[in-house]
Amino acid sequence: MTDVMTTILGRSWWFAAVLAFLSALLTLPLLHAAGIGSPENWAQWLVHFLCFGTIWRVLGFLGWLAIVLIAPKSKLLDPAKR
């Protein structure tokens, strides 16, 4: 599996902003369904950040996969310059 963050798509500010917004938006209902309304101790905060990070990675992969399926020769899929 390709790491999304090593492509031009993953390094774009607009893609990161969309991922951050959607990850936060999806993390809150997930934690609420798990019985953690608002994190109160370090363990709940850890679960919160792990959920956020996992959702971020899944959405990043889905975005990358959508670009691969829609426009496989897109410049967004090229490796990012360092």
Image (spheres, rainbow, N blue to C red):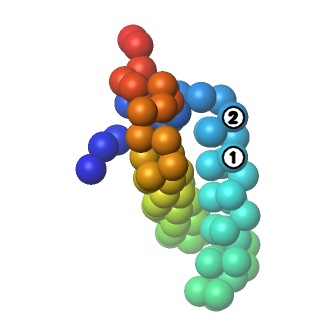
79 left or right of 66? left
Quarter of the image for residue 4 reads: top left
Q: Residue at x 63, y 58 (%)?
A: 23
Amino acid on which the number 1 mark rests in the picture: Val
Q: Which residue is mark 1?
A: 18
CA distance for labels 2 and 1: 6 Å
Q: Residue at x 44, y 52 (%)?
A: 69
Mark 2 lies on a secondary structure that is: helix
Mark 1 lies on a secondary structure that is: helix
| Label 2 with label 1: CB-CB less than 8 Å | yes
Image position, residue 53 (x, y; %): 50, 55
Q: Residue at x 69, y 46 (%)?
A: 18
Image position, residue 19 (x, y; %): 62, 49
Nearer the observer, 66 or 61: 66
Q: Which residue is mark 2?
A: 14
16 left or right of 76? right
